[in-house]
């Protein structure tokens, strides 16, 4: 069974056999212990209009699922986001999706 989560690829080649199918519920622990590197790409696939991807910058926004003013929001259903050095956090801004676990935080070295 495929893991329901964003898919990621290495900036130079592909990462370990990541075969995720979707940005959907149950992704919260997906980034754990994955060796993200600066320049890796997160690929968020989801049904357009059902979910979105919102980048949050503050730890409290991530933990409380607070949608910040002037947030960067992706809505196409097919989003590729290059990871810079450091931490990035993403939530779904649709209804209570984030509070139901549709969020991830990654750290790239």
Image: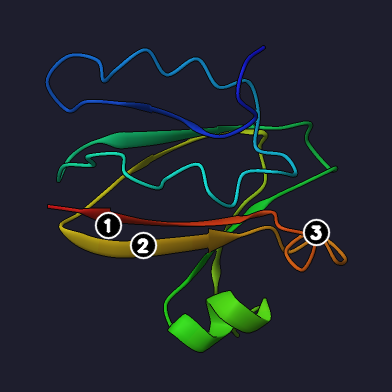
In this picture, residue 96 sits left or right of residue 43 = right
In this picture, residue 101 sits left or right of residue 73 = right
Q: CA distance from mark 1 to mark 3?
A: 22 Å
Residue drawn where x is 69% and y is 54% of the image: 102
Label 1: state its secondary structure: strand
Above or below, comparing residue 64 to residue 49 in the picture: below
Q: Position of residue 25 (x, y in %)?
A: 75, 44
Say which residue label 3 marks: 97
Residue drawn where x is 52% and y is 59% of the image: 90
Label 2: state its secondary structure: strand
Q: Tag 2: Cα neighbours inside 10 Å, few (<14), some, or many (≥20)? A: some
Q: Quadrant of the N terminus?
A: top right
Say which residue label 2 marks: 88
Marks 1 and 2 in Cβ contact (< 8 Å): yes
Label at residue 22? none
Above or below, comparing residue 79 to residue 15 in the picture: below
Q: CA distance from mark 1 to mark 2?
A: 6 Å
Residue drawn where x is 56% and y is 82% of the image: 61
**Tag in front: 1 or 2:** 1
Q: CA distance from mark 3 to mark 2?
A: 18 Å
* Image-quadrant location for residue 37: top left
Label 3: state its secondary structure: loop
Q: Position of residue 108 (x, y in %)?
A: 20, 52
* Image-quadrant location for residue 12: top left
In primary-sequence order, the first of circles 1 and 3 is 3
Say which residue label 1 marks: 107
Depth check: 66 or 81 in front? 66
Q: Position of residue 92 (x, y in %)?
A: 69, 58
Is residue 52 something one can see in this rendering? yes
In primary-sequence order, the first of circles 3 and 2 is 2
Residue drawn where x is 72% and y is 63% of the image: 98
In this picture, residue 43 sits left or right of residue 8 = right
């Amino acid at each position: 069974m495929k893991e329901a989560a964003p898919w990621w690829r290495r900036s130079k080649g592909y990462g370990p056999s990541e075969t995720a199918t979707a940005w959907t519920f149950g992704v919260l622990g997906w980034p754990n212990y994955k060796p993200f590197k600066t320049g890796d790409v997160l690929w968020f696939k989801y049904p357009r209009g059902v979910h979105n991807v919102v980048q949050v910058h503050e730890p409290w926004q991530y933990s409380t699922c607070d949608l910040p003013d002037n947030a960067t929001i992706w809505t196409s259903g097919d989003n590729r986001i290059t990871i810079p050095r450091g931490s990035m956090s993403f939530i779904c801004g649709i209804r209570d999706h984030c509070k139901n676990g549709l969020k991830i935080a990654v750290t790239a070295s």
